[in-house]
């Protein structure tokens, strides 16, 4: 996921290109079919959310997370990331500062090497106070089973809240990797995993996810400039609206396009990107990889200003 690369954006939160994008969202809301299980209707800005740390439901998964989550995988691969390379003390400061500000949702992965860092960071915090999502790259069922047990040990926990098949590109993944999906479901039945899902890195894989009854959580690449995404914004929005209407929990990632869309001559502010996530109406929550405590404050502050603006505008047009 992209890191927050522009640091002074709070003052621009109510203006600029994001406001134009937000206006387009009102005009083109997409599907409004109610999701099963009481989830928010797709394509609709949820006016009950007033704070970036308000709890939202991830579709019909049963998980409730803060609107914004903290990622640990900026440039994450080969069991390390920008966050883990900060060292344990700095990593702990990030996680605990977010938690102290009200964030309860943390996005990890085996590929990021963030499990033990996170375990040590959250020592002393009651397990029920935070939601952990992690991911495996394994495509072999037996290896996936071993991964689950290893993840539980590395995190020193009895259960994983959300377990994801990481970085899927094949359009037939729901049949090709059926054994892995069955291993996830088996762990779910045993109470070792609460919800299961996928991150897709091709449009064909996303279409398969949209048609799957197995998928409870979709973490999708979603931003206003289609940077590092799997389709143009309009095409992706239509598919994501269908996923949300189906009751799949939707989590936005690549929120600032790995930093590409918040720098340069035609850049948006990060706050523009946060507003886009909220008003698009096709994600329940979004996650961002941050590397400094100040970035967490800016993420929360920018999201709060976006919520305030959108709530005011929604009220004015109601």
Image (tube, grey):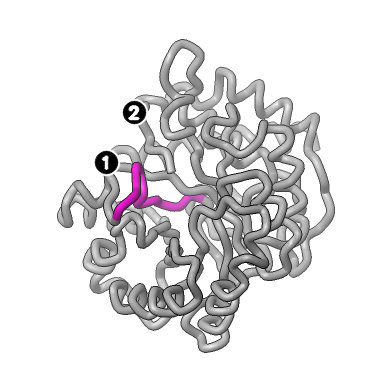
Residue 248 relative to residue 119: left or right: right
Residue 134 relative to residue 18: left or right: left
Which residue is at 41% across, 67% downward? 130
Asked whether residue 123 appears in the rendered view, the answer is yes
Structural distance between the alpha carbons of marks 1 and 2? 10 Å
Q: Classify residue 118 by image quadrant.
A: bottom left
The foreground one among 113 and 306 is: 113
Q: Position of residue 288 (x, y in %)?
A: 43, 44
| Among numbered discs 1 and 2, the one appearing first in the sequence | 2
Which residue is at 19% across, 50% downward? 90
The C terminus lies in quadrant: top right
Which residue is at 30% across, 53% downward? 78
Q: Are marks 1 and 2 in contact (CB under 8 Å)?
A: yes
Magenta-tinted stretch: 68-78
| SS type, badge 1 | loop
Q: Position of residue 46 (x, y in %)?
A: 68, 49
Few, some or many residues within 10 Å of mark 1 (<14, 14–19, 20+)? some
Q: Position of residue 133 (x, y in %)?
A: 45, 64
| SS type, badge 2 | loop
Residue 66 relative to residue 56: left or right: left
Asked whether residue 47 appears in the rendered view, the answer is no
Few, some or many residues within 10 Å of mark 2 (<14, 14–19, 20+)? some
Q: Position of residue 298 (x, y in %)?
A: 38, 36
The N terminus lies in quadrant: top left
The foreground one among 166 and 196 is: 166
The foreground one among 18 and 110 is: 110
Q: Which mark is residue 292?
A: 1
Q: Is residue 41 magenta?
A: no
Q: Which residue is mark 2?
A: 7
Q: Is residue 70 magenta?
A: yes
């Amino acid at each position: 996921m992209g890191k927050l690369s522009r640091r002074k954006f709070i003052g621009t939160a109510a203006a600029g290109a994001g406001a134009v994008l937000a206006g387009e969202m009102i005009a083109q809301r997409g599907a409004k079919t109610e999701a099963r299980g009481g989830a928010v209707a797709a394509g609709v800005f949820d006016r009950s959310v007033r704070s970036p740390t308000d709890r939202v439901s991830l579709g019909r998964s049963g998980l409730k997370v803060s609107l914004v989550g903290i990622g640990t995988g900026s440039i994450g691969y080969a069991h390390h990331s920008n966050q883990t390379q900060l060292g344990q003390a700095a990593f702990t400061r990030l996680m605990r500062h977010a938690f102290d500000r009200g964030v309860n949702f943390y996005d990890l992965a085996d590929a990021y090497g963030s499990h033990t860092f996170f375990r040590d960071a959250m020592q002393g915090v009651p397990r029920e106070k935070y939601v952990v999502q992690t991911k495996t790259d394994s495509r072999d069922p037996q290896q996936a089973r071993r991964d689950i047990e290893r993840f539980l040990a590395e995190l020193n926990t009895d259960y994983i809240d959300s377990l994801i098949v990481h970085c899927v590109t094949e359009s037939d993944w729901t049949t090709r990797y059926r054994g892995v999906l069955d291993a996830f479901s088996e762990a779910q039945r045993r109470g070792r995993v609460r919800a299961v899902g996928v991150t897709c890195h091709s449009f064909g894989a996303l279409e398969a996810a949209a048609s799957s009854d197995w998928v409870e959580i979709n973490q999708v690449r979603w931003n206003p400039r289609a940077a590092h995404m799997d389709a143009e914004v309009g095409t992706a929005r239509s598919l994501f609206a269908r996923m949300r209407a189906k009751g799949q929990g939707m989590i936005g990632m690549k929120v600032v396009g790995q930093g590409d869309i918040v720098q340069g001559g035609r850049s948006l502010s990060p706050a523009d990107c946060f507003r886009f996530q909220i008003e698009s109406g096709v994600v329940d929550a979004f996650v961002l990889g941050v590397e400094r405590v100040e970035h967490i404050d800016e993420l929360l502050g920018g999201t709060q200003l976006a919520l305030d603006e959108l709530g005011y505008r929604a009220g004015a047009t109601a």
